[in-house]
Image (cartoon, helix red, strand yellow):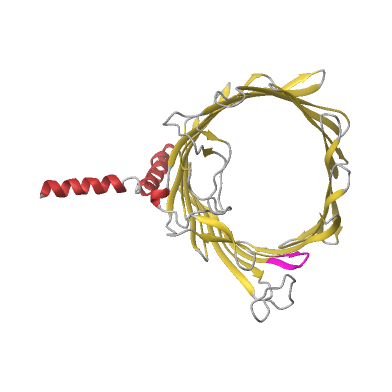
Amino acid sequence: MRRRADRIHRLQMSRTGFLELPVWAAVITVLFVLCAAPAAGAKLLDVSGRYSLATVIMPVPVSLAGGMQLNTPGELSLLKFGIESELDCTITIWDAAMHVNSAINIAGLERVIVDGMVSLGPFDAKLEIWHAVPFETVTDASHFTNWVVIPPADLMYVKTRIHTSADFTAFSVDNLFMIEDVNFPNPYADFGPLVYEIQSQSFHVGDILTITCEPFPGVTLRSVTNIAADGGSRPVKGYSAPGRVCVDCSMCESPHWNQSFTLTGLEYCGIPFWFRLDVEPCGPDILRLAGGGSFSQLGGLELSGSFSLFPLMIGGYNFSFTWNECLSGSVSLSNAFRVLSANVECEIDIPFGAMTGTFTSAATFAQDLGATSIRLGASASQGLFSGSLNVGFSKQQGTLRLSTTSTSLSMTLTPLRISFSVVFSRVGLRQATLDVGVTF
C-alpha cells in the first residue's frame, strides 16, 4: 500500500509540476535579484512607481418601448461604466531591480507581470514572468466593442522571457530567449472556443539573437537571427512587448530560422545609403537583397528611395521636407514617380498670457491630392494645470465631415495627478474618462 501511495504521489507531482512553474519562477526571480544585489555598493532599498484608478463612461443607445434601438443619439441616455486599477512598481535593491505591473477591472484580474534585472560584469540580464487571465473582444447587443473573460477565468502562466545584453569594445550582443504559450487568446480579437483551460495551452521555445558592430567609423552592421521566433508581439490584456515564438515550430523540435544583415552609414558622393540581406532557407525566396538611400543637399528637403535586387524590384520613393522647424511633410511616390499619398504637419508655439501653449495641425492626402483627414489641436499649461482641445475631420461618403472632438484637463499636485478627458464623435458622446493616479 505504501508503494502504491508513493506512485500516486509521484504521478500527481508530474502532472502539476509544470503548472507550479510560475510560482517557482517568481521565487527564482526574487532570489535572482537578491543574490546579485550584494555585488554592488549602492543604497540598500528604493521603491518607486505609480498607482492609478481610471473610470470610463460610455452612453448606451436609446431604446424605444418594445425594445427597438435607435441609431441616433439621445440627449438623455443610460451610461456604461468601466473601472480599472493599475499598479506599476519598481523595487531597487542595490543595483538590482524588480518590476511588477498588475491590473484589475470590473471583469476581474487582468495580468501580473514580474521581472527582475541585474548587472553581472559586462552583462545585463532580465528575467520576465507573465501571468494573465484570457480575454477576448466581442460586440455586445448595443453594438459596443467590449472585452470579456474567457471561462474558467483563471490567472494562467503565459510566458517566460530571458533578455541578456552586453557591450564590448568592438561589438554588442543582445539575446532574447522565450518560453511562450502560443495558443493564448489575443485579447483584441474574437476567440472561437467558449473556454480556455490549462489543457488548451501549448508552450513553444524561441530565441532572437542580435549582434551589432561597427566595422568602420560611422558604418554599422547589424545581424539578427530568429530561431522559431520573430519580432512581432503576442499581447495579454493591457500589456505587450516585442518578440514572440512561432506557432508552427519550436526551438526544441525542428526549428525554423531566418537571418538578416543590415548595413547602414554607407556614403557615396555625399549620399548615404544602406543594404539589407535576408536569408530564409525554408521561405519562397531563400535570399532577398534590398537597399536604399537618401539625398538631402537642398536645405530641409530630402528624397529617399528603396529597391530590391533578389527579386529585382523598385520599392518607390519618399520625398520629405522641413521648414523653419515648425512645418514638415512627406510625399510617397511609386517607382514611376506617381503620387501615392502625402501628409503635412505644423506645430507653432503660441503665448496665452501667463500660460504656454501650442497649436498643431496635420492633414493627409490621397493620390488625387484630395484631403482624406485633417486634425487641428491646441494645448496650454501653467503650473499645476494643463489642458488640450483637438478636432478631427475625415473623408466620409466623398466629403470631409467632423469625426471627433476631444478635450482633456489635468491637474498635478505631487504626488497626486487627476485627469479628465471627453471624446465626442459625429453622433455624440463616445467616451469620458476620469483617471486618478498617485506617484511614489
- Report whether 141 appears left or right of 96: right
Q: What x and y, as percent, mark residue 316?
A: 79, 30
Give the answer, above or below, for where 282 lies relative to 431.
above
Q: Quadrant of residue 238?
A: bottom right
What's drawn in magenta, residue-wise? 422-431
- The residue sitting at 45% across, 31% down in the picture is 251
* Magenta stretch prevailing secondary structure: strand
Q: Quadrant of residue 55?
A: bottom right
Q: Is residue 226 visible?
A: yes
Q: Is residue 361 visible?
A: no
- How many labels sit on residues? 0
- The residue sitting at 77% across, 23% down in the picture is 272
Give the answer, above or below, for where 102 lies relative to 183.
below
Give the answer, above or below, for where 32 lies relative to 135.
above
Confirm whether the magenta stretch covers residue 425: yes
- Report whether 427 appears left or right of 400: left
From the viewer's side, name the closer residue of 425 and 314.
Answer: 314
- Report whether 54 appears left or right of 290: left
Q: Quadrant of residue 78?
A: bottom right
Q: Residue furthest bottom?
A: 65
Confirm whether the magenta stretch covers residue 36: no
Q: What x and y, as percent, mark residue 103?
A: 52, 58
Q: What x and y, as percent, mark residue 323?
A: 88, 40
From the viewer's side, name the closer residue of 85 and 199.
Answer: 199
- Report whether 198 appears left or right of 124: left
Q: What x and y, as percent, mark residue 373?
A: 82, 52
Give the answer, above or below, for where 61 lies relative to 280.
below
From the viewer's side, name the closer residue of 153 and 266.
Answer: 153
Q: Quadrant of the C terminus?
A: bottom right
